[in-house]
Image: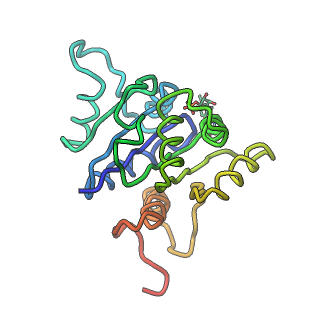
Amino acid sequence: MKRYILAITGASGSIFGVRLTEELLKVSKVHLVISSNTFPIIKDETGIDWTDKSQKSEKTEDRIRKYFKTERLFFYEDKQMDAPIASGSFKTDGMLVVPCSMKTLSGIANGYANNLIERAADVVIKEGRHLLLSPREMPFSAIHLENMLKLARLGVKIAPPVPAFYHQPKNLDDIVNFIVGKILDSFGIEHSLFKRWGS
Ligand SMILES: Cc1cc2nc3c(=O)[nH]c(=O)nc-3n(C[C@H](O)[C@H](O)[C@H](O)COP(=O)(O)O)c2cc1C
């Protein structure tokens, strides 16, 4: 079974990361890192509260596994620098950062490796594995664009969550499915999330 690293960072659009987790779990194991800045954004934008401390003994990983109803998911905090995915010797089929904040984009583009997400991406780049970032900001500054260009030239897929309308979306779900489907296409992962042009 394939094994992917997925990071959800503190850009708007956490719904893309949550939906992508669901889809990846259908076909693979997922090593998930959610940056500490992201939990309040997930709660605000989707209503999902993975920081709920009412069940004191329950770990965040257990809460997230319960949500996705799976044992295939492994969760790490972004400060957990000794996680398996921090080492190139732990083999994976690639990494996706969805959505990707401008701060994490910068950290990855400059090899800063200051948290588990930046370190795991650094490892994926040095090992020559697949890396996809879905940077979300509006508008992009020249700094953001330069960071993206630098990474694109290294073979990193830059896939911002830009919707299309040729598949005639009727609601937000259709738009989210289109973006997530395009991301899965980039990794050659089969899905039926949207109707393809010409099909
Ligand atoms: C509600 C909210 C929305 C945000 N949206 C974005 C965004 O779309 N893009 C971005 O680059 N930063 C955004 N930020 C700022 C990032 O969360 C911030 O730069 C943070 O340090 C990113 O850290 P991380 O990449 O480790 O998650 C947002 C912050 C908040 C509170």
Residue 57, given in percent of the width and then of the height, sits at: 21, 14
Q: Quadrant of the N terminus?
A: bottom left
Q: Nearer the viewer, residue 57 or 89?
A: 89
Q: Residue at x 44, y 67 (%)?
A: 185
Residue 177, given in percent of the width and then of the height, sits at: 43, 60
Tell me which corner region of the image, top left, top right, bottom left or bottom right, holds residue 118.
Answer: top right
Q: Residue at x 57, y 58 (%)?
A: 157
Q: Is residue 67 above or below residue 4?
A: above
Residue furthest to the front: 89
Q: Quadrant of the C terminus?
A: bottom left
Residue furthest to the right: 142
What coloring was used for the rendering? rainbow
Q: Is residue 160 above or below residue 71?
A: below
Residue furthest to the bottom: 198
Q: Is residue 69 above or below residue 79?
A: below
On the rendered structure, is 151 left or right of 25?
right
Q: Residue at x 61, y 48 (%)?
A: 135
Q: Where does ligand 1 appear, by image quarter? A: top right
